[in-house]
Amino acid sequence: MYWARHLVKVLKAVEILSKTGGATMDELRRGLDVDRRTSYRIRDTLEELNFPLYEDSSGLDGRKRFRFDDSYLKKLPNLNVPELKLSLSELIALYFIRGNRRMFRGTDIEHNIDAAFKKLDAFMPEGLADKLNQVKTLFVSSSKFTKDYRDKEEVVEQLTDAIFRQQTCVVEYHSFHDDKTKVFNIDPLCFFERDGGLYLFVNATSYGHIRVLAVERIIKLSPTKETFTLPKDFDPDAILEDAFSIVYDDPIEVKIRFSQEEARYIKERRWAKEQVIIEQPDGSIILELNTSGWFDVKKWVLSFGGKAEVIEPDKLRAEILAELSDAVNRYNRNSQVNDKQGDI
């Protein structure tokens, strides 16, 4: 997965190598402000992406330079880039991605996205940019619940590099569950986004299984010299499909009755890969789910108040009943306090 910072560096490398005469590896390293090893890795990435790089030692200084074939380049107003042939549907897809850049608000990544789109205008036939401005209104995204990662750029960059190098790291992490800071080893596998938040699949070596970490709760990350191999059975798409929300843990089979008022809303969406909806004579429905994430399922059911009732499993039903009873008692206590204050 070509993520964030690494992608920006790859695009910057294209710009450097597209200049007249190309660039030596030392010039590429300085232009990208990276170490020697990283500059070679980025050059290899370009070759893996089938950019036609070739070596040229014909200069007067005899130094080995890397450049693109002249026939592959297209001259733009202020930049030489490899020729790109983008269809309208591809351009629309790019604008959709731009509309969802809210997660990077206030960071260098947002700046690079905006700068790239200004240059992209040079590819467009006359009048197409104006039409795409209309298209962009189809993809308006809200940042109301987006998390702020402006102080986590270094962590994201370290993780990106560790994912590419398959490098084990020591993480200092604040656990939301028990409100404690823990230190343990991880093999970072890949990022994913959910509900305006950035998360990370890791193989937690001390725990022996795949876990999900919230990037904003990573206090410190320290790469080690140890490397790892990707678990053969690791399939992030399958995991996210099986999980009810963010938490991926033991499977749970649950039956929930929804009132007639909520039935239409529930039937409009697919809540799990394995689900069954059973219509009831009174207009209510029973939703049967096979998913994972006990806490997420409980929180979701509670959000419906009295319009949802867990039928199975008994343990989840009991936990929700306890939560609701506690809420009722709290409201009653506060009402009595307010009544007494009103009598004073």
Image: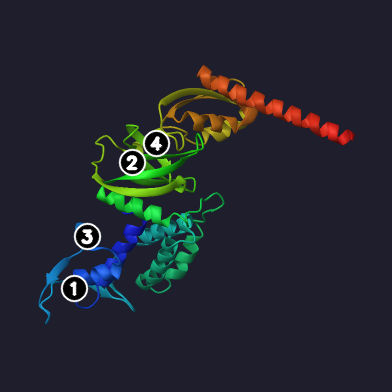
- Residue position marked by numbered label 4 in the rendering: 241
Q: Nearer the viewer, mark 1 or mark 2?
A: 2
The amino acid at mark 4 is Glu
Q: Kindly give the residue lying farthest to the bottom in the view shown.
A: 60
Using the numbered discs, state the Cα–Cα distance from disc 3 to disc 4 in whole angstroms: 37 Å
Using the numbered discs, state the Cα–Cα distance from disc 2 to disc 4 in whole angstroms: 23 Å
Using the numbered discs, state the Cα–Cα distance from disc 3 to disc 2 in whole angstroms: 23 Å
- Residue position marked by numbered label 3 in the rendering: 37
Residue 186 - label: 2
Q: Position of residue 246 (x, y in %)?
A: 45, 38
The mark that comes first in sequence, 2 or 4, is 2
| Residue at image point 39% right, 53% down | 156
| Residue at image point 47% right, 54% down | 149
Q: Position of residue 199 (x, y in %)?
A: 42, 45
Q: Nearer the viewer, mark 2 or mark 4?
A: 2
Q: Quadrant of the C terminus?
A: top right
| Residue at image point 41% right, 69% down | 115
The amino acid at mark 2 is Ile
SS at mark 3? helix
- 42 relative to 315, above or below: below
What is the crowding at mark 1: few (fewer than 14 residues within 10 Å), some, or many (at least 20)?
few
